[in-house]
């Protein structure tokens, strides 16, 4: 089948693609976006999380036939103008990255959260990342990183509002 | 301290945050081929035939290899050095499958999805054989002929003199039952390989814990000269022990050598759980004698470990469980019998702590039980029996050096408000929710000394801009050991850690080393790096002396500048020295050293947990947790805390929910999906407090000791202790799942009713 979607701001036209090809395989094998990681292939670990129309989804559970007209953001698409996203910086600064295999998915789950709840409580943060497994940490650095990013976003937003 | 103790992100954090870090399964070389494995569906069978005709018709299939068209040569995943000689029971593809998940063959195709689809089209005819899902069945003799060497390996260990029971002594029996668990490193096993035909050279990129160990096994297996086998350690998405044994490397090496094209093998989660290695289930019986005053007098342990289908490291692992007993307490008498028994379950192997968490589960339960019987506080009985600084390991005779077990216990007792919490927990026994407060302590090691060779080579030099390179065979598991080496060298040289480059294992570039296991990285390799940095300062001064024409004794080095001791206006920077030496004397500024470890100090953690058990549902919530660690010196505090918290999260998860034992027995198929293998998530993680006791020991870099494994050692035991306090029970079986707890509650009620 033919699939038209948008990945990281670019229109992507996938011709003669199997309708049951998984989004993670399209991203990794066809578009060579290797930042999306496969941890379980059944939606249990969250390593392959990407944003689909702003919502966090497991790319191992989304098939090609579900992609037409949708917008996908992967970890590679989070940077803007060569600058890391506030969340990416915050993960680095707060010691929230160890082996790094869960990090892209974790950061995107956090991004989806902050896009809907800009100032989440600890509980909301833990809930939002409860589908992302990290085996290296006890999640505390990750929660702290998301919390600190949320504060920075809010400051940025209020500065932007003032400018407007 | 300028850099030590400050706190840095791990060296490649930015790449990881950007999704740019390259793991073995992310590598790509033009025309790549992808491998998908065909594994056994039966726990024990002979393969009668394999029909690949349908699979060969699938799109993109290049080759199908299997037990009938490949080598029959055996290997052992554990034989990674010349001094380990375990029977070579494993084949890359076997016609005698011994567990569900055993490798039979592989499809090699142009796309990973195509390869997996083709595997499903292969028809395998099995002749089923009797199988054993557990030790009890194996001991009935049904699989006695599975391996020519037999299925049982036994070891025995004795410390001290046999003791007699005196008046006032208490004697008791305990039973420990630990389930099979999986490491669940977030990156499933993966590797990439290429055979260069013209150079007759094989290169394998894999996340492993010893490039030289992998080379030893692969080169011997493929009958290749060592100089033609290059192993490169890639970014590792966690190991916890699962990437320490040589499992996929011989397979991919063989395939690459046959096909002479770049090949990649990335396991699925199910394959990583079934077909690599897991932590063995154990069943241990113990007989203990304690004096009336709480002094441990005698301990006799009989431990059986389920090795799984191939012996691998199990005979050594089961022995270690006994040996590690002595790293916390003094034993007038210890007698340990360990047995590893092969079954038809996934292969057992190394797991974080290498037997010590299991040893601690047995031992700490005994301490709790003795404390209860003798009406002594659990902390007091441990203090009474604790090893003391400068005592000696009775088995290896190495000094414990600055052991701080008692200090950890006392500190934890105070910070956790132990007495107060225990009193409170006593009052919570009547309601639905029962609070429990427990603790455990664990001791571990710092490398192989003196049991096995334990040395590291380091080369270090100055680049022309004054920055530093370190060539050392490191294998960062993802916990920041590269960063730690930058910090250690930075501290000695007075140079920002970011100006220091540290290599990781590559058998063509980095020097020979025994590998990153046994918690030796910081204590041994770190000490080597410190020593080498000090040697580099001497060399820098020598070279500056030539340039300035001043004798070395008159010069001093500080923060990248060599100056005259009495006249600081005479000085020269590292950059200037490097350039001068390059162009005037036509050499580089570098040194290399060989460090042989001569120490293995005791290293401890005392852990304290408060749990809440819901007696209606059987659900256990870990409410609060304190870990006190005798670490010598903290190199990178933030990451160190993150790593310890990860160990606690992992240990809680293993104590409460993780199990590979199938719900319905009889199929021989272990749990191989995260849908059925439950890991505590962010929502279940406890509040954790980590406290360090920083008394530098007399060895190691700046007195630093290990942390990665010891932080995991006491966790499950502490959770069991807290649950037993909550329920006034005497369980030592993990995981303590809600089902299991409810079953016990109900069986207890029945007993009471009678």
Image: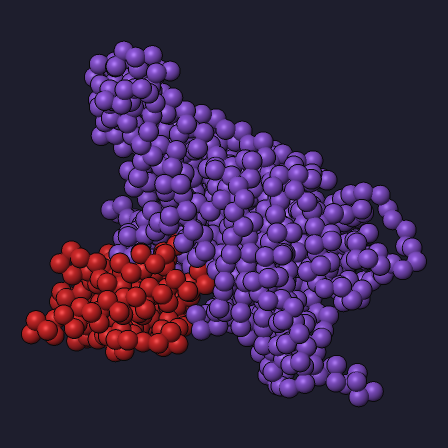
| Left or right of residue B63: residue B563 | left
Q: In the picture provided, is B458 more to the left or to the right than B221?
A: left
Residue B618: x and y, percent? 61, 80
Residue in the picture at 36% in, 28% down? B460
List x then y, in percent, for residue A133. Answer: 42, 66
Residue situated in front as seen by the camera: B122 or B2: B2
Q: Which residue is drawn at 90% across and 54% down?
A: B165
**Quarter of the rendering occupied by the N terminus of chain B:** top left
Q: Which residue lies at the image location 71% right of the left edge and 59% below the top edge?
A: B380
Q: Position of residue B546 (x, y in %)?
A: 29, 13
Q: How is the image coloured?
A: by chain
Tell me if I can see residue B422 in this picture.
yes
Quadrant position of the C terminus of chain B in the picture = bottom right
Task: Tell me the residue at 77%/85% (across/down).
Answer: B750
Residue furthest out toward the bottom = B753
- Which of the two residues, B416 or B754, is positioned nearer the viewer here? B416
Of residues B393 and B78, the one drawn nearer to the viewer in this rendering: B393
Q: Does B646 sit above or below residue B468?
A: below
Rendering colour (chain A): red
Outermost residue on the right side: it is B167
Task: Choose top left, top right, bottom left or bottom right for residue B378.
Answer: bottom right
In this view, B685 is above or below B264: below
Q: Can residue B319 be seen in this view?
A: no
Residue reaching furthest to the left: A164
Which image quadrant is residue B592 in? Answer: top left
Total number of numbered discs in the rendering = 0
Residue B277 x, y percent position in the rendering: 54, 54
Q: Is residue B185 above or below residue B706?
A: below
Q: In which quarter of the image is residue B230?
A: top left
Colour of chain B, in one word, is purple
């Amino acid at each position: 089948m033919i699939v038209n979607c948008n990945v990281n701001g670019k229109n992507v036209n996938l011709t003669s693609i199997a309708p049951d090809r998984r989004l993670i395989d399209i991203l990794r094998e066809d578009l060579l976006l290797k930042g999306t990681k496969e941890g379980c292939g059944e939606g249990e670990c969250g390593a392959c999380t990407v944003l689909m129309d702003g919502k966090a989804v497991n790319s191992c559970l989304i098939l090609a036939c579900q992609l037409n007209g949708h917008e996908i953001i992967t970890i590679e698409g989070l940077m803007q103008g060569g600058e890391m996203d506030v969340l990416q910086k915050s993960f680095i600064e707060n010691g929230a990255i160890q082996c790094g295999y869960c990090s892209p998915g974790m950061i995107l789950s956090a991004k989806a959260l902050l896009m809907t709840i800009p100032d989440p409580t600890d509980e909301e943060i833990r809930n939002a990342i409860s589908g992302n497994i990290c085996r290296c940490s006890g999640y505390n650095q990750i929660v702290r990183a998301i919390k600190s990013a949320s504060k920075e976003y809010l400051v940025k937003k209020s500065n932007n509002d003032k400018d407007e | 301290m300028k850099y030590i103790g400050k706190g840095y992100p791990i060296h490649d954090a930015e790449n990881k945050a950007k999704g740019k870090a390259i793991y073995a399964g992310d590598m790509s070389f033009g025309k790549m081929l992808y491998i998908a494995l065909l594994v056994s569906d039966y726990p024990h069978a002979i393969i009668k035939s394999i029909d690949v005709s349908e699979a060969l018709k699938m799109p993109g299939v290049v080759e199908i290899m299997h037990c009938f068209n490949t080598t029959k040569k055996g290997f052992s995943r554990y034989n990674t050095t010349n001094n380990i000689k375990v029977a070579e029971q494993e084949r890359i593809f076997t016609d005698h499958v011994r567990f569900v998940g055993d490798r039979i063959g592989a499809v090699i195709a142009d796309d990973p999805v195509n390869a997996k689809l083709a595997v499903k089209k292969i028809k395998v005819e099995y002749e089923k054989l009797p199988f054993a899902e557990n030790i009890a069945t194996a001991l009935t003799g049904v699989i006695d002929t599975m391996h020519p060497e037999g299925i049982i390996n036994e070891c025995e260990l004795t410390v001290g003199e046999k003791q007699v029971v005196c008046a006032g002594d208490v004697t008791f029996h305990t039973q420990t039952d630990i389930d099979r668990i999986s490491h669940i490193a977030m990156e499933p096993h993966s590797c990439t390989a290429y055979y260069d035909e013209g150079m007759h050279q094989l290169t394998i990129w894999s996340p492993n814990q010893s490039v030289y160990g992998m080379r030893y096994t692969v080169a011997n297996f493929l009958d290749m000269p060592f100089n033609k086998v290059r192993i490169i350690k890639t970014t590792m998405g966690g190991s916890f022990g699962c990437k320490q044994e040589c499992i996929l490397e011989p397979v991919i090496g063989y395939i690459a050598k046959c096909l002479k094209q770049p090949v990649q093998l990335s396991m699925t989660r199910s394959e990583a759980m079934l077909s690599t290695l897991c932590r063995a289930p154990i069943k241990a019986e113990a007989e203990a004698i304690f004096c009336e005053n709480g002094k441990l007098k005698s301990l006799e342990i009989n431990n059986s470990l389920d090795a799984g289908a191939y012996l691998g490291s199990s005979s050594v692992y089961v022995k270690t469980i006994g040996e590690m007993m002595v790293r916390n307490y003094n034993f007038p008498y210890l007698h340990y019998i360990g047995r590893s028994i092969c079954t038809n379950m996934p292969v057992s192997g190394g797991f974080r702590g290498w037997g010590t968490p299991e040893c601690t589960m047995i031992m700490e339960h005994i301490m709790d039980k003795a404390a209860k019987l003798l009406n002594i506080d659990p902390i007091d009985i441990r203090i009474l029996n604790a090893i003391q600084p400068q005592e000696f390991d009775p088995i290896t005779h190495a000094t414990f050096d600055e052991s701080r077990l008692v200090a950890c216990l006392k500190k934890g007792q105070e910070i956790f408000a132990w007495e107060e919490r225990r009193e409170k927990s006593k009052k919570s026994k009547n309601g639905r929710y029962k609070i429990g407060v427990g603790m455990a302590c664990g001791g571990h090691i710092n490398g192989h000394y003196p049991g096995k060779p334990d040395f590291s080579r380091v080369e270090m030099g100055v680049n022309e801009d004054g920055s530093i390179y370190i060539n050392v065979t490191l294998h960062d598991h993802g916990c920041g050991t590269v960063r730690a080496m930058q910090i250690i060298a930075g501290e000695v040289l007075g140079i920002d850690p970011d100006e220091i480059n540290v290599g990781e294992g590559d058998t063509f570039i980095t020097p020979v080393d025994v590998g990153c296991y046994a918690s030796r990285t910081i204590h041994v390799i770190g000490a080597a790096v410190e020593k080498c940095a000090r040697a580099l300062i001497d060399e820098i001064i020598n070279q500056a002396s030539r340039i300035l024409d001043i004798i070395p004794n008159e010069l001093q080095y500080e923060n990248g500048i060599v100056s005259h001791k009495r006249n600081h206006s005479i000085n020269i920077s590292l950059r200037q020295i490097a350039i001068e030496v390059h162009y005037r004397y036509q050499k580089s500024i570098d040194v290399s050293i060989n460090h042989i470890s001569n120490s293995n100090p005791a290293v401890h953690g005392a852990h304290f947990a408060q749990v809440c058990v819901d007696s209606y549902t059987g659900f256990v919530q870990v409410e609060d947790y304190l870990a006190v660690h005798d670490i010598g010196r903290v190199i990178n505090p933030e990451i160190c805390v993150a790593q310890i918290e990860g160990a606690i999260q992992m240990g809680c998860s293993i104590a409460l929910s993780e199990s590979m034992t199938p719900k319905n027995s009889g199929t021989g198929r272990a749990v191989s999906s995260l849908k059925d293998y439950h890991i505590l998530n962010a929502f279940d993680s406890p509040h954790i407090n980590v406290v360090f006791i920083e008394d530098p020991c007399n060895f190691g870099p700046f007195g630093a000791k290990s942390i990665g494994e010891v932080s995991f050692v006491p966790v499950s035991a502490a959770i069991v202790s807290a649950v037993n306090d909550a329920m006034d029970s005497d369980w030592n079986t993990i995981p303590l799942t809600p089902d299991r707890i409810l079953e016990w509650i109900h069986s207890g009620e029945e007993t009471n009713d009678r």
